[in-house]
Image (cartoon, rainbow, N blue to C red):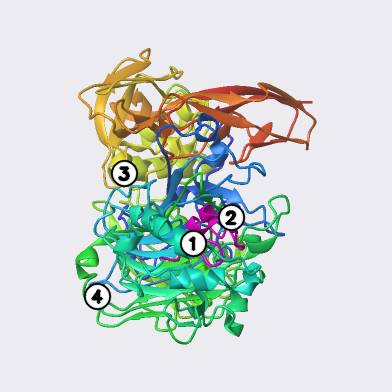
Amino acid sequence: MSMQGRKRKLAVLLSASMLSSTVFGCWLGTGIVEVHAATKEAKNYFAEGLGTGIDFSENSWDFTTVFKTGADENVVTDPASQAGIVENEHSGKQEKIVRLINNVRTDAKREGIISSRAGVAIVGDKISLKDTSEFSAKYTISMPDAWSKPQNAGGGYGIAFIVTPMEEIKGNTSTGMAYYGNKDSLVIEMDSYFNGGHCNFDSSEGTYVNWVYDNQIYANSGFGYLQGLADDTRNNGLEYDWVNKGPAYWTKLNNWGYASLPDSSERRFDHIGVMKDGVVREHHGISYLNGLKPDEVKNGKYVNVNAASASTASDSSKCATRFADAGDIDVLGEGVDNRLFTLWVDYDGENLYVRYANGSFLEAARPENAQIAMEKVYGFSHIFTESDVHIGFLSSISEDSMANHTLHSFAFANTYFENGIPNDYVLNNEKVKAAKKAVQQALENITVKNDTTGEKIQEAVNDVLKNASSDFSDVTVTVGDITKTEATVTGEGNIRGTITVRCGDTADTIIIDKTIAKLPENGNTGNITEGENGGTGNITEGENGGTGNITEEENTSVSKLVRELKVSKKTAEKILAMAGKYDISMETLLIGEDTFKKQQSEGDVKGSTFYRLQAAGSKTTAKSVKLTWKNVRGADGYQIYAAKCGRKNKWKLVKDIRKGSTKTFTQKKLNKGTAYKYVVRGYKMIDGRKITIAASKCVYVFTDGGKYGNTKSVKVKKTKVNLKKGKTYQVKASQVKEKKALKKYRNICYESTNPKVAAVSGKGLIRAKAKGTCKVYVYAQNGKQKEIKVTVK
């Protein structure tokens, strides 16, 4: 909200419009936060996706896509081939999904189009586990558009759920669904291997190699299992010349390492596997889909491939035991495209249980008995003991075997639920979190006085929730006992208490700790209202550069500046006048040095904009990063804040430039091949204080010499757009990378210089609001941008 001249209002209580429904990527459980301080709450719960009540949000996840050396440049540079959040093209409803692997449906031939790659999606904030290390997780996946190339002999492909305290989670493109080599990790793999590419036999040797009826078999040296399937009449009675060709075939399997596995216990079909420490060969627990048991054979054939239960996993009559089937490449929704698998992973600190069933997050029926039950498992203790953990998903494909590996829904709690995470727990947490956020924002804007009571706070909170656009009808907010020390002319007072937010069995607590301003000597209440400053409410022209008149609403703004910036009333009035002159929002004014000390998120600082500074990483070497920005009108200087990327790395002030005309800075002595983040803060000196008049969006830059590079430029289809009021235009933008692959900390972003003329959504949809002109900036994570001029007629 900008203040043009002196006409904008800052209400004491947050208005209902400001408390409208907001997408929160994660919720907090019963952690306590003090309203007066920016104390970081420990994350102990996360939920996003269809059925959780919350859409997937880019702000909640760290996405990485790793391509093999020599990968197809057209694929590498295509934003659609990167891991990220997309709309589900296979769904009849609007549904955001996480695509670990995307864009494999490119053409019917598949030749030379898809490049081997790994996709990684990790929840940005760590989860704090209890001393018991217990947790429960629930998630829904699918593997649509599956395909495998004839003569395929590749490794394990599918989706892996990972829990690890490690800071860096690498995607491996060679094997193990990308999790190979990630130490100190618990992985639940949904292993589809060849992604269901073949449901028929061929008499040639090659198709036996790439597998044919149920994927993931490891043959024994007697060839009995393969021979039994080859002779099965369901496969057209085709037989293979095992006598003459068998030894050569086994030699080929042996060369791929299959012979190193025991004859009967390690032949694998599509399965769920419990893995540890990034080791892909050792299954600590395993369950084949539909209970298929590779060692149950009668007359050379698998006993339960045709069992009644086998049909429940697939609409396909040929591939009943797979995560994925091929289907018709040109028909959306065919075969596996709408097949969902939901999994429950529950760990009580000693026992690990894994269950799975077909169906969506809300509709799948959780099995009474776990398909994998690992009792008294102490081998995981080193992973979780006294650790906060990262949670997320990994996947990999090759040119031989692929699918659009998809996460539909995900919930995780640092509490063990014997019966799995209940659906209402997910929804109740969402409501509690949203209500808590609204109450906290309201409390921050309440001015307390000596006559403030718990009843008055309760009334204010009730009004906020009642007028909010979100439905809080089943949420109860209770203000508890209040203790108060009244303010005097010689000292400040204080109000302390608690507020409980509850929905069903889910509750959270807020601590009230508000300061009552010291009373002025004239004995008034301490609230600045018209006339209470000893006069009429008017300030003479020249005292602060203003017009000479100050409204009651502006007095509220002055009071906020006094409280938040710890300045005098006179200085606050000068700041307010300056803000009106340069059109600076209150959120921007409140950015101070403490803001960066308290900033815990990897994202942008509240109150920052792109268009004012347009900060960007313009040049890099292995040891340095050069930043550039635009001069800001009225600036007396600039501060540069920097840190290595990662939420645990704290911001540091690396340069204070005391010259308003400067617009470059180079940081040296950096690490090679490392990601750094920067914020440029423009300030104006008022009464000896640095007051923020502009703050840049976070700039993410990689130094040279590593695996990843930076965006070279941003491309848009149109740089001039003419619209009639009420009409829309979808920006089509893409990033041109330098030479190295891009690691995504943020998608392409959009910002309008005047949302009253033309607003732009986070996905680049421009909507004409009123007659006039403005600019829309399309910018990459390193600040490279393209400008679009918008004219509304």
Residue farthest top in this picture: 661
- Label 3, label 4: how many angstroms apart (C-alpha)? 27 Å
Residue 293: x and y in percent read 45, 79
Query: Which of the two labelled residues, at mark 4 and mark 1, occupies the earlier sequence position?
Result: 4
Report the amino acid beneath label 3: Gly
Query: Which of the two labelled residues, at mark 3 and mark 1, occupies the earlier sequence position?
Result: 1
Residue name at image x 23 percent, y 30 percent:
671
Query: Which of the two labelled residues, at mark 3 and mark 2, occupies the earlier sequence position?
Result: 2
Residue 355: x and y in percent read 45, 77
In the image, which disc is placed on residue 192? 1
Pointer 3 local density, CA inside 10 Å: few below 14, some 14–19, many at least 20: some
The answer to whether 497 is drawn above or below residue 39 in the figure is: below
Q: Which residues are magenta?
A: 195-218
Provide the major secondary structure of the magenta segment.
loop
Camera-side mark, 3 or 1: 1
- Label 3, label 2: how many angstroms apart (C-alpha)? 34 Å
Report the amino acid beneath label 2: Ala
The answer to whether 667 is drawn above or below residue 506 in the figure is: above
Mark 1–mark 2 contact, CB under 8 Å? yes
Residue 724 versus residue 561: which sits nearer the camera? 724
Residue at the spot of label 2: 146
In the image, which disc is placed on residue 646? 3
- Label 4, label 1: how many angstroms apart (C-alpha)? 33 Å
**Left or right: 790 as drawn, with respect to 201:** right
Quarter holding the C terminus is top right
Residue name at image x 36 percent, y 75 percent:
264
- Say which element carries label 1: loop
The answer to whether 668 is drawn above or below residue 252 in the figure is: above
- Label 3, label 1: how many angstroms apart (C-alpha)? 32 Å
